[in-house]
Amino acid sequence: MILSDKRILEEIDKGIIVIEPFDRKCLGTNSYDVHLGKYLATYKDEVLDAKKHNEIVHFEIPEEGYILQPGNLYLGVTLEYTESHGHVPFLEGKSSTGRLGIDIHATAGKGDVGFCNTWTLEISVAQPVRVYAGMPIGQLIYFVVEGDIETMYNSKGNAKYNNKTIRPVESMMWKNAF
């Protein structure tokens, strides 16, 4: 079950959902629009290795925007910091974003209950497109959880993305044992 606009507002009032900054105009019928933060990042190396720490280079989107190129992976970040203490948050692209040929996540659209941070976006484009800090980039939808939660994400000792940030975060796959 997906939360409605009224239910999202109720959960915000209770502190079960946190969205900062919050703008009532961004609340849809059953979603909340999130915006592109001012930082993007790219990986330093052309070939990435799942067993090593692949470093990234952060840069700020200039006021005149930044042109994303096909064939490159960009890491972006949401302007909004969010917390979800009772629902599973999903980040999806907006139809207007998709119609510009912008994909905002390769595989990581689902958050965990207890995720408290900005969202790193895995951005790719079908053709060159100029993006701007603050532009609508996606929407959060919240699903009801069935059953009790044993361990919230923000209390897991092995959670890799718990450090609060306003910049995109690179893959932490290298921290996994395999």
Image: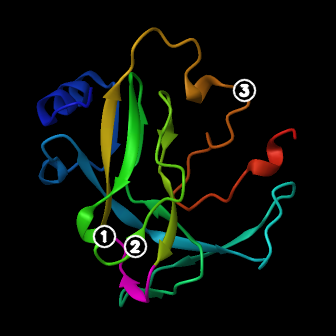
Secondary structure type for disc 3: loop
The image quadrant where one finds the N terminus is top left
Secondary structure type for disc 2: strand
> Viewer-proximal residue, 50 or 9?
50
Which amino acid, mark 2?
Ile
Residue 77: mark: none
Read off the magenta span: 126-134
Whether 43 is drawn above or below 80: the answer is below
Q: Are marks 2 and 1 in contact (CB under 8 Å)?
A: yes
Which residue is labeled 3 in the image? 157
x 28%, y 74%: residue: 99
Q: Residue 174: where, in percent of width, then height?
A: 82, 50
**Lower sequence index among marks 1 and 3:** 1
Q: Is residue 150 visible?
A: yes
Give how far apart the Cα atoms at labels 1 and 3 are.
35 Å
Q: Residue 133: where, in percent of width, then height?
A: 37, 74
Residue 102: mark: 2
**Lower sequence index among marks 2 and 1:** 1
The image quadrant that residue 93 belongs to is bottom left
> Viewer-proximal residue, 123 or 44?
123
